Image: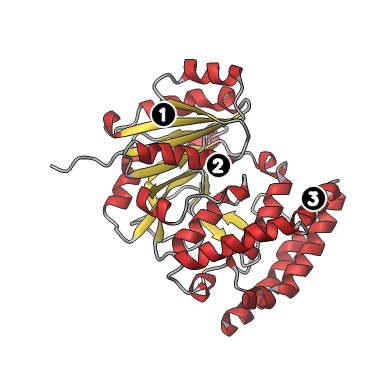
Amino acid sequence: MNMPKKVGIILINYQNYAVRFLAECRDSLRRQDYPAESFCVYVIDNASTPETENFLRATYPEAELITRADGNYAAANNLGFRRAIADGCDYLVTVNMDTEMEADWLSQLVIALDGRPEAAIAQSKVLLYPRGDEDRAVPKINSLGNIFHFLGFGFTFCYGEPDRPVSGYPEINGYASGCSFIIRAAVWEAVGGYNEEFYMYHDDVELSLKVRLSGHKIILAPRSVIRHKYEFDRSVRMFYYIERNRVLTLFAFYPLWFLILITPPALAIQLGLLLYAGVHGWLKTSFRVYAYFLCPKNYVKLHKYRREIKRLSTVPFSDLAGSFSGRIEFQEIANPLLNRLVNPVLDLYWNIVKRII
C-alpha cells in the first residue's frame, strides 16, 4: 500500500490577521480527513511582534511557528516552503488564513496531483464565504482559476456566479489563485520559488507563469472546496504593489518584440490609471511606482531575473501568450466606460496581435 504524500501547509499572519481569522481556519484544518501524520502546518508570523507570537502559540499550538521581521508576503511563503521541504514534504500548499475548508479539501488537492503527472499546480474551487442565508442557500464562486490579461492585469474566473458542479480537472490557462493551491515541491524548487521582489500581490501570477513556461500544467481541483472571506477594499488599499507588480510582470516575462507590440494600449491604459489615481487621491502612490522603474539598481535585478526566466523556459512565449485575455473583467467594479469602450478596443487590438504572433 502506497504511503500518502507528505504535505506542508503554509499560513501567513500579518499584524492582526490571525486575531480576525485564525480560529475558524485552524478548526477547518483540524477536521481534515487527510492522515494527520502526513501533513504539517507552518504559520509564518510576518512582521512578528511578541504579542502576535504569543497569540499564535496559544491559539494553534500544534502548528510550527516561524517568525519574520518584515511584511514581505512572497518571502514569508518562501521561508515556509523551504522549511516544509527540509522536513521531507513532497507537496506544498499555500492557503489564505481568512478561509474555511471542507473536510476533504486537502485530500482532494493531493488526489488531483497524484493522478496527473503533467500538472504541477492544482487550485481549489474557491467559494465566497456566505454572508447570510441567501449565500448559504446559493453559494457564490470566488475563483475557478484566474485569468491573465495581456497588459498584466489578473482577475478571477466566474467571480460572483452561482456555484455549480465542475467535472474532471480542467486546465487553468491563466494562473492559480494564491488563496488555495498545491504545488509539487520539486517543481517549486526548479523554478526558484517566489521572486521576493514582488513583496505582495501578483506573487501567484509570477509563480504560475514560471511553472507554465517550464512546461507544466495548472489544473482546477473542483472537489477541493474552500470558502474565502474575500474583501475587495482590502486589496484596493495596496494600490502601489498591485500596480508596480503588474508592470514588473510585463518587464520580467515579455520579450522585447512583444513589449513593442503592446506599447500603444499599455500607454493608453497607463494614462487612464493615472487619471483614476488622481480622482482617488493616489497620485503620490503612482509616482512611487514610476520612481521604482526609474531606479538603475532595479534594472540590474530585472536583467538577472529575465535571464533566470529564459533559463527555465521550455515553452515558447508565443504559446503562453495565446492564452492571455483581451478583456479586463473587474467584476467588483461596474464601469460602463470599461465595458462599452475600453474592453471592445482592447479585445480588437489583442486579436490583431494574436494573429501577428
Q: CA distance from mark 3 to mark 1?
A: 40 Å
Q: CA distance from mark 2 to mark 1?
A: 25 Å
- Pick whichever of labels 2 and 1 is earlier in the sequence: 1
Please tell me whether mark 1 sits on a helix, a strand or a loop: helix
Please tell me whether mark 3 sits on a helix, a strand or a loop: helix
Q: Which residue is mark 1?
A: 28
Q: Which residue is mark 2?
A: 75
Q: Which residue is mark 3?
A: 288
Where 41 sits versus 283, above or below?
above
Please tell me whether mark 2 sits on a helix, a strand or a loop: helix
Q: Position of residue 225 (x, y in %)?
A: 41, 42
Q: Amino acid at mark 1?
A: Ser
**Front-most of residues 265 and 338:** 265
Q: Please tell me which residue is depicted at 82% across the width and 57% down the height of the picture.
A: 274
Q: Quadrant of residue 211?
A: bottom left
Give the quadrant of the N terminus: top left
Q: CA distance from mark 2 to mark 3?
A: 22 Å
Give the quadrant of the C terminus: bottom right
Q: Is residue 208 left or right of residue 292?
A: left
Q: Amino acid at mark 2?
A: Ala
Numbered-mark total: 3
Q: Position of residue 55 (x, y in %)?
A: 54, 17
Q: Amino acid at mark 3?
A: Arg
Q: Please tell me which residue is depicted at 70% across the width and 54% down the height of the picture.
A: 244
Q: Residue furthest bottom?
A: 356
Q: Quadrant of residue 45?
A: top right
Q: Position of residue 22 (x, y in %)?
A: 51, 26
Q: Position of residue 297 (x, y in %)?
A: 71, 56
Where 260 sits versus 339, above or below?
below
Residue 35 visible? The answer is: yes
**Which is closer to the viewer, label 3 or label 1?**
3
